[in-house]
Image (cartoon, rainbow, N blue to C red):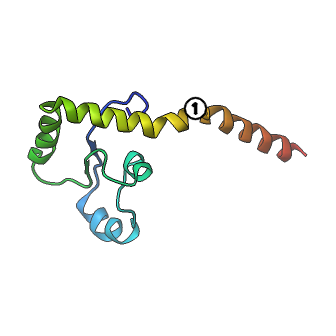
Amino acid sequence: MAAATCPMVIMYQSSRLLWHLAGKYIIKTRYLSLVNILAGRELVPEFMPYFTSVDPIVDAVVQRLEDPPELARISAALKELVHPLAARKAGDETAGVVLELLGSARG
């Protein structure tokens, strides 16, 4: 979605038990989505974990859909965020690293 510069709302599902036992104590990042982590701010809303009503999620979606300038701002920010990553051809770089590792493993 980010590569397509498409505004989004991010949701993760987790059990209450898992979140209360592990999630709150192990996860130390301010944001959970890669988009927001790379942006260093909340570029897209995140709902993690979400146990009750879907109303806040619906509100976040409707709020953005009803605000075309905000959608354009988010799209532009996503393009700015993703462009340097896409320009580097990360897939090609990753394939090169894998081939290198395979070559060194064979000796």
Question: Viewer-proximal residue, 34 or 63?
Answer: 63
Snapshot quadrant of residue 16:
bottom left
Question: Viewer-proximal residue, 76 or 25?
Answer: 76
81 lies above or below 36: above
The amino acid type of the residue labelled 1 equals Ala
Give residue 28's position: percent from left, percent from top: 39, 67
Most extreme residue toward the right is 107
Q: Is residue 97 left or right of residue 67?
A: right
Q: Is residue 38 left or right of residue 68?
A: right
Give residue 81's position: percent from left, percent from top: 44, 40
Give residue 105's position: percent from left, percent from top: 83, 47
3 lies above or below 101: above
Give residue 19's position: percent from left, percent from top: 29, 63
Q: Quadrant of the N terminus?
A: top left
Image point (31%, 46%), residue name: 43
Snapshot quadrant of residue 78:
top left
Number of other residues with Cα within 10 Å of mark 1, as a class: few under 14, some 14 to 19, many 20 or more: few
Question: Viewer-proximal residue, 51 or 81?
Answer: 81
Image point (8%, 45%), residue name: 55
Q: Secondary structure at mark 1?
A: helix
Q: Is residue 106 left or right of residue 25?
A: right
Q: Is residue 79 left or right of residue 62?
A: right
Snapshot quadrant of residue 96:
top right
Question: Viewer-proximal residue, 68 or 16?
Answer: 68
Number of labels in the image equals 1
Image point (16%, 44%), residue name: 57
Q: Which residue is mark 1?
A: 87
69 lies above or below 31: above
